[in-house]
Amino acid sequence: MSEVGSRIDRCRVCDSVELEPAIDLGNQPWCNHFLTQEQVGHEPFYPLRVVYCHACATPQLDFTVPKEVMFGNHTYLSGVTTSLDQHFQAVAEEVDSFFFRHTEGKSVLDIGSNDGTQLKHFKTLGYDILGVEPSKTTAEMAMEKGITTVNEFFNIDLVRCLGRQFHVINAAGVFFHLEELHSAAEGIREALRPEGVFVVQFLYMKRIVENGAFDQIYHEHLLYYNLSNIEVLLNRHGLSLFDACVTSIHGGSVVAYVTHQGGRSPSSRLQALLREEELPGSNQFSTYQEFAGRIDRMKDQNVTDLEALKRKGQRVFGFGAPAKGNTLLNYFNLGTRLIECLVEKNVLRRGLFSPGMHIPIVLEHELTQVPDVYYVLAWNFKEEILTRNQHLVDQGIHFHFPVNPGDADR
């Protein structure tokens, strides 16, 4: 089943028509469309292709699934994972310490605030907080926790309705989701106080390629940023990077600090990261062509490994049901013949099925059997997973990491 979306013919960042196909992952359901039993087999599929802009070097999807489809009522919860919560706390404390520790009446706006996990840390630090979250379910969950939340999509029109400016604007894992990209960027410029700081947290495309983390390509992620191409976007709207660091969260993410152009000088660590980005050719088209070939080799190896386990009579469960895991499951064509179920902590996914491959989801605390092997789809939280499940490792249960930026098998 297919469903109408929209295909772009110009770069989402710079409007160039110099787009060239780089990575094609076929037709896939959008990854957060977890299914009820009645929906199984009726989910829509959409092209999942990355094109490269030769003008600004931005990899991006050439097909847009409408934001109302993907974000109106999705099931992702940022507060489920301890390490992500700790990361958000560290970001809030660093922003406050660096910029606004002694500021009276300090305020923060969080774009795509989800269940309020990031904002609760700013609230603890004394900020006046406001979240903007399009998903009704998660916005309500945040409100129940005392996190003031507007249940809307973020754009310039919303900013003008709010009619105020903020010391801090945060966007964690959402700035590459934005269908209304330029409206949102202009909204950020208008809502940011003259001395304000926009904290943009995004998956680092340089690390995605280095790690082989192709599963981080999915329909919600319309754009794939390196520091040089996000600067092109920011400059179009009178904003500019002045500092950045790379963190281990999600396998390699950037926390970048942005302000109005001319407001602050670039830091030495930002300049160092920009130099490091250019040395391996991270922004070259040939890099993405080579990546596409590696993805296919990963597919062959993973299918071979799982087939071998099946022949040995070993039971394999998926560990986690992250949205990105559905890119991998669908491109590798891994269904219930090889993976019996997906074991998840997020209660919103209880009793649902993965889109495309239709693997049933079981909550971790309701599990009555254990497998021989856990195929870890939530590989980006490797350290937390292995630490929390050391008792299973001690029992001889094998944790296999299909995407692995290090020596992950245990």
Image (cartoon, rainbow, N blue to C red):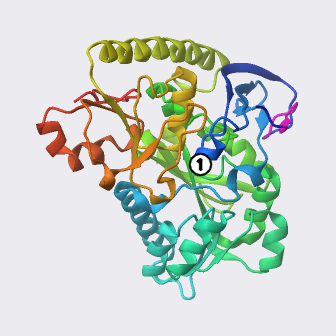
Residue in the image at 69% along x and 63% along y: 134
Asked which quadrant contains residue 222, the reply is top right
Asked which quadrant contains residue 274, the reply is top right
Q: Is residue 5 magenta?
A: yes
Location of residue 147 in the rendering, given as x and y in whole percent from the top left corner: 55, 79
Instruction: State the residue in front, 342 or 230.
Output: 342
Location of residue 13 in the rendering, given as x and y in whole percent from the top left corner: 78, 41
Instruction: State the residue in front, 83 or 17.
Output: 83
Tell me the SS state at disc 1.
loop
- At label 1, the amino acid type is Thr
Residue in the image at 82% along x and 77% along y: 161
Answer with left or right where residue 18 lies relative to residue 269. Answer: right
Q: Quadrant of the C terminus?
A: top left
Residue in the image at 41% along x and 69% along y: 93
Residue in the image at 82% along x and 38% along y: 14
Q: Is residue 193 above or below residue 188?
A: below
Instruction: State the residue in front, 200 or 27.
Output: 27
Q: Is residue 403 magenta?
A: no
Q: Residue furthest bottom?
A: 104
Range shown magenta? 4-12
Q: Quadrant of the N terminus?
A: top right
